[in-house]
Amino acid sequence: MSQESEQISLKRRILSLPTILSFGIAIALVIFLATRFDLDWGQMWGNIRSMNPWYYVLGLFLYYISFLFRGLRWRMLAANAALIEGEQRQHPDIKIPGTLKSAQFILIGWFVNTITFLRMGDAYRAYSFSKESKGSFSWSLGTVLAERTLDMVVVSVLVIISVFAVSRSLDSSASRYLLIAAIVLAIGLIALLALMRGYGHRLAQFLPKRFNKAYDQFHLGTLGSMRRALPVLLLLSAIGWILEAARLYFVVQALGLEVSLAMALLVSLGHGILSTVPTPGGVGAVEPGLTGLLLLSFNRHDAASVTLLDRSITLLSVMLFGGLLFLATQIIHARRQFQNPTSPSQPGTSDTSN
């Protein structure tokens, strides 16, 4: 199947009726869970209406600044994966997108995640990155896996720090469950990389021959992306998560509430872990989980108010801004195709090419 056909198929899947229906089901699940908390919606709406808009805007701003650090990290990972020993290009035709472009791909991917199951946005942004860079899709997807591994390692360290700080002041059994989840995810990803490094090519021999080249590219994208500047990559990952914590901290401040920095960090990390649940945008898992963590510091109405206001940034604003960016890129692509109807598209290199 051609890259253009794959793009059309992916668009249809993203905008399909089952996807829209699944998102509606997820919203219904949130409403059901909210009723189980016995919440006073009037009181929560009153809390939100009286919020300080400047703190809210600051939290929104910091959230989107984090995309730049994530974009820079992804660009560095891809640049590493495009090199072999001696600074020689493994793929001389690859053109690594800039930091801003990489950040845009991440935002669009997160938008796709908010409207599809199974985190298809990760595959979509890998596809977009491969098309822009003229690399293969499997190579680009490998850099996304490397990015996820770095995230979970950093999340595990930050959760340990925040759990220790929070546990000194309150009984935080929920935070300990979060710690276990973060460590399990991190160990699982690290074990996967170790398996790929030691036995990946051997196991790939059992795959059909037409998949061997794709696996080689995936292997290179995953393991090759972390061969250089690992401390810098970990630092960029930490900055991204600290900015996420700052977002939550100012959301709480906007509601006139107080929260410790350690608690803001813990809850934001919990949000990140819960959002990996393969529902649209983590809907149905993030909301009750986030509220449950916030109950360690607030009553249930204030906790739910924080959750709703925070999700207006991490879910609704991503649907709005990411959706507009997605639409703009499709319009630009269609305009280019209209202006150059006879010119071939510029997809990423096929996985089966030599």
Image (cartoon, grey):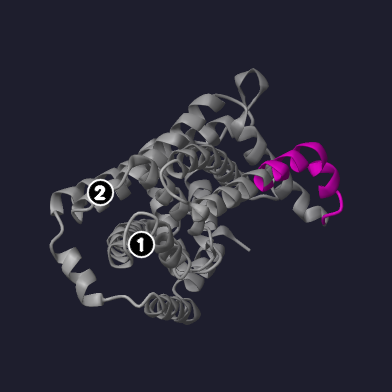
Q: Which quarter of the rendering shows the N terminus? A: bottom right
- Report helix, strand or loop for mark 1: helix
Q: Label 2, on which residue? A: 258
Residue 176 point in image, percent of width and height? 54, 50
Q: Label 1, on which residue? A: 315
Q: Which comes before the other along the chain, label 2 or label 1?
A: 2
Residue 276 point in image, percent of width and height? 52, 58
Magenta stretch contains residue 111: no
Query: Is residue 354 toward the left or the right of residue 47 in the image?
Result: right
Q: What residue span does the magenta drawing correspond to? A: 188-207
Residue 217 point in image, percent of width and height? 68, 43
User: From what the image shows, is residue 235 above or below residue 249?
Assistant: above
Query: Is residue 65 toward the left or the right of residue 89 in the image?
Result: left
| Amino acid type at image mark 1 | Leu
Residue at x 42% of width, y 41% of height:
241
Residue at x 73% of width, y 48% of height:
215
Q: Is residue 82 visible?
A: no
Q: Residues within 10 Å of mark 1 (few under 14, many from 20)?
A: some
Q: What's the magenta bit mostly, secondary-structure-wise? A: helix
- Report helix, strand or loop for mark 2: loop
